Image: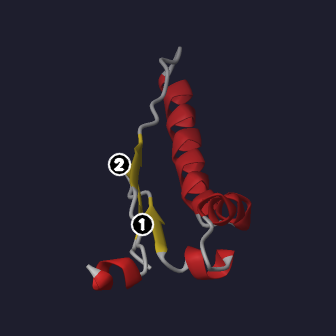
Amino acid sequence: MSATLLATPTYQAKSQVFVSVSTGDSTSDLLQGSNFTQNQVTSYTDIVTSPRVLIPVIAQLGLPTTSDQLAGSITADSPLNTSSSISRSPM
């Protein structure tokens, strides 16, 4: 039991985001909406590792780390034509 009490806690989370395009009046509208959606999802993956997101997380959880260190343990991607995936490696 003492080993459990002395172990550094680890945190792991996974998130998936689904973004869709509303109907459009033309093929051009749908293409424009699709391009916009792909750009938005890419920006979501960038935001995940930003200090603006990580500093409040560090404060709320009382983590002994910096936003740069925490960002190094987070992966976020948005493969084309798939759902976006964000995960965090244990510290």
Vertical placement of residue 63 versus 76, above or below = below
Residue 7 visible here: no
In the image, taking residue 79 as reference, residue 3 lies left or right, namely left
- Report the amino acid beneath label 1: Tyr
- The image quadrant of residue 12 is bottom left
Front one among 22 and 45: 45
Front one among 17 and 60: 60
- 10 Å neighbourhood of mark 1: few (<14), some, or many (≥20)? few
Which of the two discs, 1 and 2, sits closer to the camera?
Answer: 1
Secondary structure beneath dot 2 equals loop
Q: CA distance from mark 1 to mark 2?
A: 29 Å
In the image, taking residue 35 as reference, residue 18 lies left or right, namely left
Front one among 39 and 25: 39
Q: Position of residue 4 (x, y in %)?
A: 31, 78
Secondary structure beneath dot 1 equals loop
Residue occupied by mark 2 = 81
Residue 42 visible here: yes
- The image quadrant of residue 79 is bottom left
Q: Residue furthest front?
A: 2
Q: Position of residue 56 (x, y in %)?
A: 70, 58
